[in-house]
Structure formats: structure tokens, C-alpha cells
Image (cartoon, helix red, strand yellow):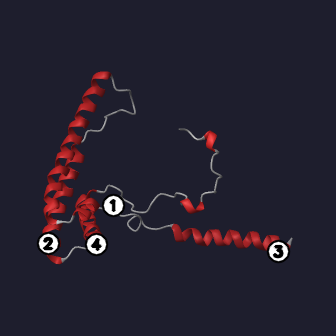
Amino acid sequence: MRTTNFCYIFLTSALLFSSSLFAQEKSQRGKRLTPEQRIERQVEKMDKQLLLDDETSAKFLPLYKEYLTALAECRQDMPAPKGAREKELNDDELDKFMLSRFECRKKCLEIQETYYKKFKEILTMRQVEKVFCFRPNPKPHHRISPEKLPIKAPLPAEKLIR
């Protein structure tokens, strides 16, 4: 009985004192980056990922920053359905919305094709592939490796599809 009360008192006091640790100022929590800062970080990250020498880096980084800025502007122009949550869009509004989205996607694709040609002149094809690879996280998804899969007996010959 006495140890049970002691445990409850200890846990309660630990909760009270540890809760102040989580009370951080809003400025210390996730700082929101401006679009320019976000682009700068992406440029720095790509520079590290591609392992560029100084000469290539001097040519590539301004061009890559220009590319990211153009893509960001293109994505800003992409319309969002206004009031779609409050009401259903009628067919005409939905048609206009879809057509404008297609136009913006075409514009983004044209930007990518233009800069692909420019990057091809500066970088190797493996580096260009890394630039246009749209996986933000290069780690593979949580999959079971083939070695860890259970071994199954092969199918008999009569059950094989021919």
C-alpha cells in the first residue's frame, strides 16, 4: 500500500515537472521558411548530393536556383478549387478548373524540358537523373527483403501455367 502511494506520487510529480519541458516558444518550434530560403536549402542539398567540383558548381547552382524559382512560380499559378469543401462544383466550373490545371502542368513540363537540356550540357547523365528524380526521401520504403521472405516449395509441373 505504501509503495503504491509512493509510485503514484512519484509519477504525478514527474508528469508535473516534465510538462514544462514541452512548453517551448513558438519561435523555437518548426520555423517556417520563406520560399527563397526553401529554394536556397534545396540548392545547398543538391550541391552536396551531386558532389560537384568548383567549376561545375559555379555553372550549375545559379541555373538550378533559376529552375526551382521558375517551378515555384508555375506551381503558384496552379489554381485550387475555391470553395470546393463548402459546396460541390458544377460541371462547368469543374471543367474550367481541370483545363486550367492541365495548362499549368504543361507549363511546368515545358520548364522541366527546357532546364533538362541546359543541365545536360553541364552535368553527367547520372547527375541529371538525380536532379529530376522526384523522390524527396532516397530511403526505400519498408519492404521485406527477398532473403527474409518465407521459402515456398515450387509448384508441381501440372499446376504451372503454360
Residues tagged 3 and 1 counted as in contact (Cβ below 8 A): no
Residue 3 tag number: 3
Residues tagged 3 and 2 counted as in contact (Cβ below 8 A): no
Image quarter of the N terminus: bottom right
Q: Is residue 131 above or below residue 98?
A: below
Please name the residue that numbered disc 1 is placed on.
32
Task: Name the amino acid type tagged 3.
Answer: Thr
Q: CA distance from mark 4 to mark 1?
A: 23 Å
Residue 80 x/y as whole percent: 30, 38
Please name the residue that numbered disc 2 is placed on.
58
Disc number lying in front (3 or 4): 4
How packed mark 1 is, by other alpha carbons closer than 10 Å (few <14, some 14-19, many 20 or more), is: few
Residue 50 x/y as whole percent: 26, 69
In the rendered image, the residue lying farthest to the right is 1
Task: Name the amino acid type tagged 1.
Answer: Arg
Q: CA distance from mark 3 to mark 4?
A: 56 Å
Q: CA distance from mark 4 to mark 2?
A: 13 Å
The numbered mark, 3 or 4, whose residue comes first in the sequence reads 3
How packed mark 3 is, by other alpha carbons closer than 10 Å (few <14, some 14-19, many 20 or more), is: few
Disc number lying in front (3 or 1): 1
| Secondary structure of residue under mark 4 | helix
Q: CA distance from mark 3 to mark 2?
A: 68 Å
Disc number lying in front (3 or 2): 2
Residue 48 tag number: 4
